[in-house]
Each structure stands twice: as C-alpha cells, then as structure tokens.
Image (cartoon, grey):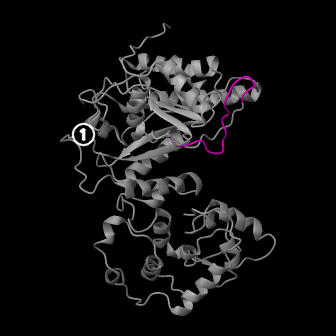
Amino acid sequence: MQHTRIPEQLPVMEKLKILSDAAKYDVACTSSGTARGNNGKGIGNCFDAGICHSFAADGRCISLLKILLTNECIFNCRYCLNRSSNDVPRATFTPDEICDLVIGFYRRNYIEGLFLSSGILNSPDYTMELLYQTLYKLRSQYHFGGYIHVKAIPGADPFLIEKTGFLADRMSVNLELPTAEGLRRLAPAKSREKILKPMRQVQNRMEENREELALYRSAPRFVPAGQSTQMIIGATPENDFQIMSVAESLYKKFDLKRVFYSAFVRVNDDSALPALPGGPPLLREHRLYQADWLLRFYGFEAGELLSEDRPNFNILFDPKCDWALRHLELFPVEINRASYQTLLRVPGIGVKSAQRIVKARRLGSLDFQDLKRMGVVLKRALYFITCRGRTLYPIKIEEDYITRNLLYVKEKLPPELRDDVTYRQLSLFDDGMPLSVEEQSVLLDVSAGSAAAFAGGGAI
C-alpha cells in the first residue's frame, strides 16, 4: 500500500491540545490485562498490573497518552462533537508526530503506553492505513514495547485490521448506541452490521492465534489483551434491561474483555437529542458498571437483575443488594457452609473476600470478627448471613426492615434525592425504629477488630 501524506498545518502541541481534548469522550480504555517485555534492544514494557487512564494536559503523569489520530470525520452523527457539520477546530496527526510524542513522553516518564482512536478521515481504509502506519513505526522503527490500545475502524479492509491487530495489545470497535434503532435515529450513516463485522473478525482471529501459539510459542500475538467496546447511555430511550441484555450478548457471542458505558453528554444543540435537565446520567452509568461486574465475575445473568416488568435499576441500592432484597427467601446463608457461588451473591462479600472465606474455613469455623478482617462489608452483609447459626444481632428478614436499616447506616443517597427526601420520609416503614444503642455497640465492637483487615475493598 502507498504511504499517505497529511499536510502539516498546525504546530504539534496545538494538535495535541485539540486531539487529546477530542478523545475525552472515548472511555473504552482500562488496565491492559497483558504483559510484554522487550528484548533488551527496545524501550518500554507492557505490564498486566494496570496500565490505565490518559495523559493530562497539565503534565501530570498518567499512564496512557490518549489521543485521536484526527477529529476530522466524514460522518454526521448527531451526538458527536466531531461530526462533519460542527464548526470546531480540526487537526490531524501524522504517524511520525504520534511516534515522536509517545517516545518523548515515555522518556520523560509521563506515560507507559498509547490509547489511539480516530475520526474517519476521507474513508475507513484511509484512516485504518494511518493507524497501521503509526503502530508499525512505533514497534519496528522506535522499538516501543509499551501497551497500545487502538480502534478498529468499521468498514475498513479486513487485511488492514488484521495487520494492525498484530501490533496492538488491545483493539476495540465502538458499538456507539445499544440498539440498531438508536443508530438509525442518531447515526444513520453507520449500521450495526458494519460495526459487528470487525468485532467478529477480531474474535475469530484471536481464537486462531491461540491455536497457533499452542503449537508455536514464537508465533506473533494477535490482540493479546482482547477487545472491548463502548455504548453511549442516555442518548436514546433504551432501558437498563435492554442495555444489559445487549452487553450480556456481546460477552457471550464476541468474547469481549469489557463493555464500557458512557453517560451521554449533550455537546450539540440538536432536536433529536434528549434535553438532560439534570445533566449526564452518571448514577445510571454507575449502576450499569456495577451490574456489568456482576455479569463478568459474580455469576449473575441480566434476566436475574432486571426484567421487562422491572426494566431499570434501583437508584437507592446497587444491583446486587437490590437483587438480595427481592430474594430474601434465599437468606440468611451460613458463612461456614455456603458454596462459593452462594457467597458471591451476598451483599458486602466480593470475589476476594469470598475466596478468603472458602480458604479460611478449611482450618476452622469463622465468626463476624474473622469476616471483618477478610474485607467483608458487614454493614451490608450482616442482614444476609449467619456465623455458626447466629446473626450478628437479632434482625428481621423483612424487606422493609432491611431497606430502612441499610439506609440508616449511611448508604449514600444519589444527589437528586438528597434535597427532596428527608429522614422522616425514609422512616415510613412498619417496623419503626432504627438500630438500637445495643445493636450499634455490637457493630462498633466488630469494627474495632479491623486493624489487620485485608486490602480487598470494593465488595459489591
């Protein structure tokens, strides 16, 4: 293929300012999940322990340089700041400029890798060729061994996507919107079929590459950190159940590493877009991420968390806690006998703490002090578990009672409720008073034994 040339109209640092800012709406980057060392002749290593985030314009060291190759675009998606009809400053990097930036920032210890996305300049093939040239120069000319996450451009030649995949650690194809109907409304030039085609190609080539590596360890690696995608949430009217069903299908059918959810930000004045008087739906985005975690690591299915009759997540409680409150017939569970899969469904018990419980109880029975030291969030878990056949204090296995007390022990309310809901309104349950002084003292006693607590927080 012929090497393309891009006119250099702006200083590189001016381009960096424009194209790093334009990349901020693409959230599909996270820890690498792969490791690569160089051969002693190159620079940079890719560690699987967590290359993430982006490079800040003020010079702070954040791991990834997160930029667009260009914010020029032939498409006119209604939700996109870089759509062709918008009058915004435009810029395009040359492959050499990106290489110089990556190596320069790496040598200054600002970054460890690159997150490279792009608008569509001229055509999908033209843009994909530029992305390939950039990665090829970084790997072969500059011998850069750090983490690279690159976008595959829907509609581009599959051969270009494959060549680029052998140079990248992770590839992603943005689904854009959860449904085909949403795409027709807001991005009519795009189609679900064109988006899923490169996603399927990457999946199939990854499977073939695993077989090649099993036979020949020295075979080149294709997208070793897997592929991901991103959905914009709130630009179209899909409910949470539809969104989670799409995510679940993507995990099962395309073997994705991650689905990212991006709360819609209204950057264009367009009658087809929702007004969002309360701002971007950040709480909704947060609940979707929590539910996504349950799908990937806790053994839940979308149909367990939501349904057509109950299509949206509870704003007061995370999806796991909400599920438990609706299935109290399964609780309490005995910590010393429950299976690992059952422990994962207890609010306040995460993957690490469940593993610790299973391992520790082989040596003897556990009590609440032990659970606290293992990282269990007892303020949630205590309503759903017993240790040696007893609860922490006398409790009622009733939805109203547990809901009221979970809120009382400072379950954080979303901002939109703080001004409108008073303590009195939250107290309208039949069982009356919050935790007694005696009950609170038991909790304090357990908390006092947490000095040697394990680091594994964040249990859902």
Mark 1: which secondary structure? loop
How many numbered callouts?
A: 1
Q: Residue furthest right?
A: 363
Q: Residue at x 69, y 66 (%)?
A: 454
* Residue drawn where x is 70% and y is 82% of the image: 388
| Left or right, 209 with reference to 196 | right
Q: Residue at x 40, y 90 (%)?
A: 432
Q: Which residue is mark 1?
A: 268
Q: Tell me what residue is drawn at x 40 percent, y 49 percent.
A: 243
Query: How far across and down, in percent of the image, does residue 135 sit?
Result: 56, 22
Residue 110 visible to the viewer: yes
Q: Where is residue 40, by image quadrant?
A: top right
Rendered view: 372 above or below 273: below
Measured as percent of width and height from the top left, residue 352 is found at 66, 60
* Amino acid on which disc 1 is placed: Asn
Question: Who is closer to the viewer here, 201 or 112?
Answer: 112
Most extreme residue toward the top is 2
Magenta residues: mostly which secondary structure?
Answer: loop
Q: Is residue 443 left or right of residue 77?
A: right
Question: Can you say whether 149 is above or below 355 in the image?
Answer: above
Q: Position of residue 283 (x, y in %)?
A: 38, 58
- Of all residues, the one furthest to the left in this rendering is 271
How packed mark 1 is, by other alpha carbons closer than 10 Å (few <14, some 14-19, many 20 or more), is some
Q: For residue 141: magenta? A: no
**Residue 226: horizontal and vertical position, in percent?**
58, 36
Query: Which region is colored magenta?
Result: 38-54
Name the one closer to the observer, 265 or 392: 265
Quadrant containing the C terminus is bottom right
Q: Is residue 53 magenta?
A: yes
- Above or below, 319 relative to 214: below
Residue 392 shows in the view = no
In this view, 130 is above or below 189: above
